[in-house]
Image (spheres, rainbow, N blue to C red):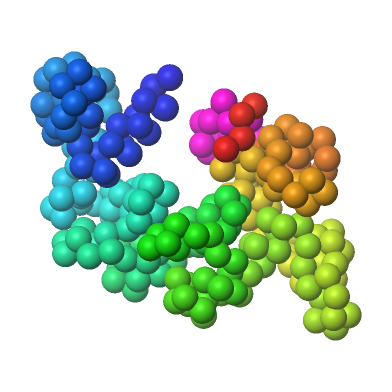
Amino acid sequence: DKETATRILEAQIVTGGIVDFKRGKKMSVTLASNLGLIHKSTQENLKKLEKASKGKYAEDTTKEKLIALQAEIGGISDPHTKEPLTIIQAVKKGHLSEEKAFSLLTKQIANGGILHHKTGMRLCVEDAMEHELIDENLYQDLKKAEDICLHHSICPEMNKIVALPQAISLGLISSDFQRKVQEIQASTGSIFDPGFGQKITLTEAVKKGLISKPVMGQAVIASEMKEAILYPG
């Protein structure tokens, strides 16, 4: 569909240009458009993304989109110097808002852990802190986000692990924060099932009571990802 096609083109731009499979070459948005490889309705936004990827002037929304795509594909680079950046370095340099950084890192946690791009390893929040992939400002919230994704939390007073519903009733995690994190988690297309130790579809997660129907509905609307409900990543 059109949405999926646009996302593929955006990913190609971030990694060097639109791919012409017949010629085996990468090309600019303008050339790809002239050859009929791009729909006219998406051309303008793709041009903006292309400019941002080359370090040229771009609106904040376009810059954030570029960094979000880089974070998901192969690591962030500074738009001007092209030096590799962690998400937290991108925040400190003003390329990314802290809220967007939280969302990107929570998605990584939901997919198995915070990504260490140099090694390709997925790290827990604790280890990510040690490797300076996150800082103190985000640590507490990301630790709670990790607990929500794993459906449990450590209660300091009891000194033991408690299930997520109990953690919420004890006030360790607020229900509003739980919903926020689960919406981000659901936007990845699947939910971690602690009983099976693996990801399951959103519809299965609703049946098991791991997320609510409104959370699933919000994720589908936000991401326009119809196929992901049936086929989790």
Q: In the rendered image of this protein, does residue 97 appear above or below residue 190?
A: below
The image shows residue 103 at horizontal and vertical percentages of 51, 56
Q: Nearer the viewer, residue 195 or 175?
A: 195
* Quarter of the figure with residue 39: top left
Which residues fall within the magenta stretch? 217-229
* Quarter of the figure with residue 232: top right
Where, quadrant-wise, is the N terminus in this rendering? top left
Q: Please report the residue visible at 64 percent of the width from the left and 40 percent of the height from the top.
A: 190
Left or right, residue 154 beside residue 6 = right
Left or right, residue 100 beside residue 162 = left
The image shows residue 71 at horizontal and vertical percentages of 39, 54
Where, quadrant-wise, is the C terminus in this rendering? top right
Q: Nearer the viewer, residue 216 or 15?
A: 15
> Which residue is situated farthest in the bottom direction here?
157
Q: Please report the residue visible at 54 percent of the width from the left and 52 percent of the height from the top.
A: 107
Q: In the rendered image of this protein, does residue 137 appear above or below residue 58?
A: below
> Which residue is situated farthest in the front direction here?
119
**Res. 182 visible in picture:** yes
Q: Please report the residue visible at 50 percent of the width from the left and 60 percent of the height from the top.
A: 121
Q: In the rendered image of this protein, does residue 219 appear above or below residue 43?
A: below
| 74 falls in the magenta region | no
| 218 falls in the magenta region | yes
* Quarter of the figure with residue 77: bottom left
